[in-house]
Image (tube, rainbow, N blue to C red):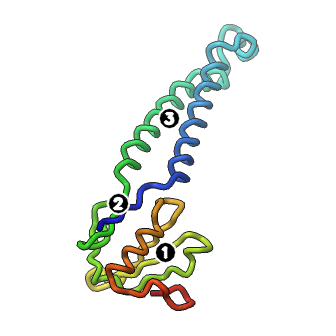
Amino acid sequence: MAVTALPSKFTMKWNTLCAVVCLFMAGYFYYDGHYNKEYIEKETVDGVPSLDLKINQTYGPICCVISAVYLGYMVFSLSRKKIVVDENGLTLADGTTIPLDRLTKIDKSKFKKRGKVYIEYEDGDKVSTLELKDTVYDGIDALLAEILKLTGQDTAADETGQA
């Protein structure tokens, strides 16, 4: 049975917050640059707008575009970002599949405290380490249990948390 870990609620909320802050800044700059008559009069000397006023008039649309691009990236990127474990191996978000027989060590000692799991695997001639965090993906615990089940490693690892 395939187990999937999707982007976490923390990641989604953080990215949404960043986009909302950018939209707020766009509104703030746009308002000051175009609708705040008091500010416009104060920042205009002899019919020439000051640098601050020009910045407010320019940054409003720029922040709006940045926010739209960021929201587009978030929807496009995060909707495709997932990790899957099945009989074929561990398939990462970038599409790389690591066969389960190449996994050499699973360190879950920091999982309960920090939500991190370190998986060492053979990558050609070298040993690489993969870090999985529960702040990035929801379902890391189910993913870890499935890896341990498919590799035949005992789920009750020794006290160091290594399997």
Q: Which numbered dot is residue 67?
A: 3
Q: Do callouts 3 and 1 mark residues in contact (Cβ within 8 Å)?
A: no
Q: What element carries label 3?
A: helix
The tag earlier along the polypeptide, 3 or 2, is 3
- Amino acid bearing label 1: Val
Give the amino acid at mark 2: Ala
Read off the residue under disc 2: 93
Can you say whether 85 is above or below 43 in the image? below
The reply to whether the C-beta atoms of the residues labelled 3 and 2 are less than 8 Å apart is no
Q: Name the residue under label 1.
A: 117
Query: Is 57 left, or right, of 102 in this rendering?
Result: right
| Of the pair 86 and 105, the residue shown nearer to us | 86
- Locate the N terminus by quadrant: bottom left
* Amino acid type of the residue that numbered disc 3 sits on in the rendered structure: Ser
The residue at the point 40 percent across, 81 percent down is 120
Which quadrant of the view contains residue 25?
top right
Furthest residue in direction top, as rendered: 47
**How far is mark 2 from mark 1, CA to CA?**
16 Å
Q: The residue tagged with tag 2: helix, strand or loop?
A: loop
| Distance between the alpha carbons at the discs numbered 3 and 1 | 33 Å
Q: Residue at x 28, y 66 (%)?
A: 96
> Can you say whether 22 is above or below 46 in the image?
below
Q: Residue at x 58, y 42 (%)?
A: 17
Q: Vertically, is 73 above or below 119?
A: above
Q: Measured from the top left, where is residue 92 in percent x and y?
A: 34, 65
Q: Are marks 2 and 1 in contact (CB under 8 Å)?
A: no
